[in-house]
Amino acid sequence: MSAPLKAIDGNADLAALMTDLAAKARAAARVLALAPPEQKNRALSAIEAAIRANAAAILAANAEDVAEARAGGMSSAFVDRLTLTPARVDGMADGVATVREIIDPVGAVTESWQRPNGMTIERVRVPLGVIGVIFESRPNVAADAGVLCLKSGNAVILRGGSDSFRSCRAIHDCLVQGLREAGLPEAAITLVPTRDRAAVGLMLTGLNGGIDVIVPRGGKSLVARVEAEARVPVFAHLEGVNHIYVDASARLDMAKSVVLNAKMRRPGVCGAVETLLIDRNAAATKLKPLVEMLIEAGCEVRGDDTVQGADSRVKPASDEDWNTEYEDAIISAKIVDSLDDAIAHIQNHGSHHTDAIVTEDAAAAQRFLNEVDSAIVLHNASTQFADGGEFGFGAEIGIATGKFHARGPVGAEQLTSFKYRVHGTGQTRP
């Protein structure tokens, strides 16, 4: 399906190539912004069908990427993020179908009012323009970002990690096929055709006004670089230093189920819990069962003195552990004296991504949900629900942890801005 692996790595004309890609994406964005919902949905249907029909080719390309990653000594968590399975490819296609069924956000009038002079003012959703998405390891981001930008009327330039280069090319072929079948410009979803890291730096310049916003999807170092160097707005996606606080009133069976899922379902995803906080009043009955459960499931536990006393297999936690996104089967655990202490710990050590409380105390739950300043807060549910698909968005372009424009899962609606339409009957300002 994909052409043989021939990147333009080291090409002296990389800057010219990237500028040309952005110019074509800008032209495609103007077409896409005016495309009717029916045409965009036809493209999404064709993309879904192409992904399903070409699953074998996608998996074969991914197998080459995975083999290369393993040969390069990448961690098991990294390999898990990189790996596509038949179920994950099906999930990718299902996500496209869900995005197709979402109400088109473009052109929606969110507010309307009339002024005393008779003018009517409307606030209406419009696309952002051209979005640059820079991501690492997870090839499914190519599909998620591509279809969300399509639905929201934006063109997108995708720059995947070098480790997922083949996988992204195979997925991109399906995206382009869908655009072609619906009569939309193929440049509406562009994949940077090189592993050369200089392409990232060029994207961060904005490519002569060709890119309107950058979305980084990856580790802390990538996000830090993007935020430091970008000359265009950035949807920040910080690391997921996520917490679960087990309150004294929590049911042990629920706490075990939620904590195990939050850590071990997929340890490498950004919604995985990294720190377990247990109320001191719960320690006598809940600490040992929770620690034993995690260790027996293959999770390394690093804890404070009390947690270490619960099981000899617990390793001592360092100061650095409380600020670490492991992206692996490792968790730090700590005893806190109260809900206030739990909230303070999260404020001091968290990344404002996703945090949860397990409790049967409605007042404690309400305080946690109100006072923890994170993009996603949960009561009696796993942190691994931090996902656009689980929110009903079909997919996400990332979890925004900042407070400007978008926060939490960034879906189609969050990829729009707005403008004001003013209807008059000849009014002039006195």
Image (tube, rainbow, N blue to C red):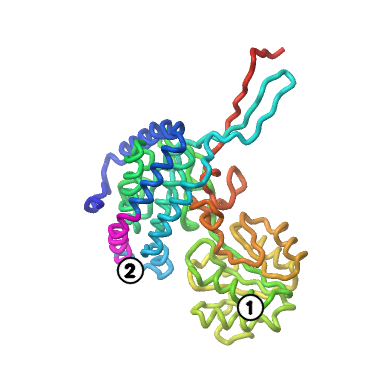
Residue 233 can be seen in this image:
yes
Disc number for residue 351: none
Which residue is depicted at the point 54% across and 53% down?
A: 392
Instruction: Give, as a three-letter code, the residue at label 2.
Output: Arg
- Disc marking residue 253: 1
Residue 209 showing in the rendered view: no
Answer few, some or many: residues within 10 Å of disc 1's Cα (few below 14, many 20 plus, some between 14 and 19). few
Depth check: give the residue in front, 244 or 105: 105
Task: Please name which of the two marks, 1 or 2, marks the residue nearer to the observer.
Answer: 1
On screen, residue 204 versus residue 250, left or right, reads left
Amino acid residing under circle 1: Asp
Can you identify the residue that label 2 sits on?
A: 70
The image shows residue 379, relative to residue 36, as above or below, that is below
Q: Which residues are magenta?
A: 52-67
Label 2 packing within 10 angstroms: few (<14), some (14-19), many (20+): few
Residue 418 position in % (x across, y down): 57, 34
State left or right for residue 180 relative to residue 391: left
Check disc 2 and report its element: helix, strand or loop: helix
Check if residue 65 falls in the magenta segment. Answer: yes
The residue depicted at 63 percent of the width and 85 percent of the height is: 310
Q: Say whether disc 1 or disc 2 marks the residue closer to the N-terminus.
A: 2
Q: Nearer the viewer, residue 255 or 112?
A: 112
Q: Main secondary structure of the magenta part?
A: helix
Q: Quadrant of residue 178?
A: top left
Q: Does 285 sit left or right of 154 as displayed?
A: right
Q: Is residue 66 magenta?
A: yes
List x then y, in percent, for residue 323.
58, 65
User: Quick one: quadrant of the C terminus?
Assistant: top right
Secondary structure of residue under mark 1: helix
